[in-house]
Amino acid sequence: MENPELLLGIPFVLLGLLGLLIAASLFAVPAEETAGGGAVGAHAMARPHDAHPTPSEYVVIGLILAMITAVEVALYYIDMEQGVLIPTLLILSAAKFAFVVLWFMHLKFDSPLLSRLFATGFFGAIVLFTVVMATLGANLV
Amino acid sequence: MAMHAPAAESHSLETNTGLDNRKLLMWLFLASECLFFGSFIAAFLLYRDRNVVGPYPEDLYDIPFTSVSSFVLLMSSLTMVLALSAIQRGNMQAMRVWLVATALLGLSFLAGQAFEFTEFWNEGLSLDQNLFGTTFFVLTGFHGAHVSVGVLILLSLVDASWRGKLTPDHSLTVELAGLYWHFVDIVWIVIFTLIYLIQPV
């Protein structure tokens, strides 16, 4: 084989397929909900919509996001070990991501189906990212 | 935390999922966009440090400037969600103010990106100069194109509102525009960290 190192990607592909299977299982509607097409709609219609945050709560979340960004930039200028800096930056970025998706995009309050739909695409992207980085030898640093 | 239920969403729809199909389609589109941008980010990280010739990322990046741009886009998400909250409360005037504010913040971000691109170009970075240039311009260019489309959508909503074609009954339309706008913001959150702040040693 011309590039035997590509074989290292196989476990990641399998991991990706496993991830997609898990995502697909999250999608599956429970049997009792699928018994009769109208039953699903009736069930959903009976479920009250969760309330959304108030404008002042949105402002608080906006301030939190601004503060996290300030911390990120400050960390960039502090002389830190890469092993500490990179995970910290990734965690802060993930926190901002989660705040926007859950609160501003209302996934925290909307139907779980929408969360599952988005999670499938998001984790699909993570799998794609991991496979590309692992098989083609890229590094974050 | 005190919550309020949006007036226009107090009823569910008679679909198989109980959700409006337009909203479902928007989330499906956003899920596919994750893969779209995930591919470009992976390509950037793969090729960033495989340049034969310069200029290199560390020679060009202006982190304070990009931080301000990131802050501007982040705050545009706040104004967007306030616009949605306003229309859900039936306050059309407030909605227009917040939508215009969001569009202006988006335009500020685009102006910053145009300035950054011009600076990089003047330093010798182009689409075909090296692999960093190719992947950087493609990734951030596509993101900028998404922001531009978002600004056009926001301005068209403001226009529709002025002409009386957007009423509190159409809060879902603003919500869908908001979902798109917030997605553009979260993509930048990832780009800012992975592309700008985490540098190769």
Image (cartoon, grey):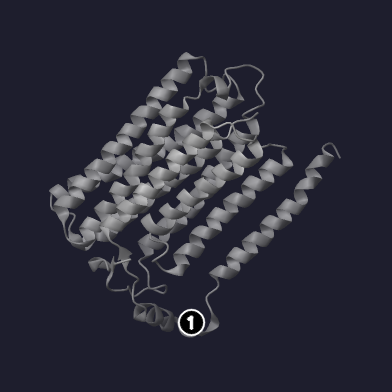
Q: Is residue B42 above or below residue A94?
A: above
Residue drawn 70% across the image and 57% down it:
A15
- Between B104 and B11, the one nearer to me in the picture: B104
Count of numbered circles in the view: 1
- Picture quarter with the N terminus of chain A: top right
- Left or right relative to A107: residue A89: right
Mark 1 belongs to chain: A
Can you give x and y, in whole percent of width and height, for residue A6 in the image? Answer: 78, 42
Task: From the viewer's side, name the closer residue of B118 and A53.
Answer: A53
Residue B184 is at least partly visible in this image: no
Q: Which residue in the structure is indicated by mark 1?
A: A33
Query: Toward which corner of the image does residue B7 lie, by quadrant?
Result: bottom left
Question: What residue do we see at 71% from left, 43% from top?
Answer: A134
Residue flagged by tag 1: what amino acid is it? Glu
B104 vs B115: above or below: below
Residue B1 rendering spot, x and y as whole percentages: 33, 66
